[in-house]
Amino acid sequence: MELKDKIFVITGAARGIGAEAARRFSGMGAKVVALDVDEDGLRRLETEVDGAIHGVCADISNEKGVEGAFEEVVAKFGGVDVLINCAVIRGNGPLAEVEEATIDLALGVGLKGGILCAKRAAEEMRKRGGGAIVNMSSFYAHTPAKERVVYVAVKGGVEGLTRALAVE
């Protein structure tokens, strides 16, 4: 697949897998928009690649944040060809110590955010005749580990989302 000038939106892109994906795809000629709540991390990433990546500070756990981010993407680049959902809040710890706010945040970013971004990206992709949505999961969705209840639940949900999107 020729990536030159394809428009990529990558969530959770200020660090980790999301940042590395942003670096790689921009290096292959794609126009990359990195979404994250970590504005400093986004600015570091932009500087590191001499502006080849456009960072957008956005909270994808709610529709308003997603809509604002995608409005900026469309205004700057004209659409979306590829969405890569990498954003996640791990929420690790013993079940007895997991707080409701952590659960809400992890589900809001990792699952709800993925759904909202997929919904908005698909809207733009239909206008362009198609596109691709990639959701990052984890082996923990299949092989749970101690003190990772929230993360395992989110990644299991991401896999269900991916299967559901495939038949949409």
Image (cartoon, helix red, strand yellow):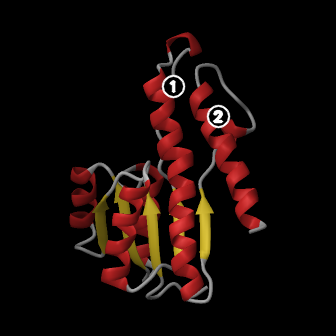
Q: Amino acid at mark 2?
A: Ala
Question: Which quarter of the rendering shows the C terminus?
Answer: bottom right
Q: Which mark is residue 153?
A: 2
Which residue position holds label 1? 92
Q: Is residue 73 above or below residue 97?
A: below
Q: Position of residue 33 (x, y in %)?
A: 37, 70
Q: Residue at x 48, y 33 (%)?
A: 104
Residue closest to the far front: 64
Marks 2 and 1: which is nearer the front?
2
Q: Residue at x 44, y 58 (%)?
A: 11
Q: Secondary structure at mark 2?
A: helix
Residue closest to the far top: 96
Q: How many marks?
A: 2
Q: Nearer the viewer, residue 86 or 4?
A: 86
Q: Residue at x 47, y 19 (%)?
A: 99
Q: Position of residue 44 (x, y in %)?
A: 23, 57
Q: Nearer the viewer, residue 30 or 48?
A: 30
Binning the other alpha carbons within 10 Å of mark 2 as few (below 14), some (14 to 19) or many (20 upward) gives: some
Q: Quadrant of residue 9?
A: bottom left
Distance between mark 2 and mark 1 Cα atoms: 11 Å
Q: Is residue 136 above or below residue 145?
A: below
Q: Amino acid at mark 1?
A: Asn
Q: Residue at x 52, y 58 (%)?
A: 116
119 on left or right of 102:
right
Question: Which quarter of the rendering shows the N terminus?
Answer: bottom right
Q: Secondary structure at mark 1?
A: loop
Q: Position of residue 71 (x, y in %)?
A: 35, 73
Instruction: Give the mark nearest the N terminus, 2 or 1.
Output: 1
Q: Is residue 67 above or below residue 89?
A: below
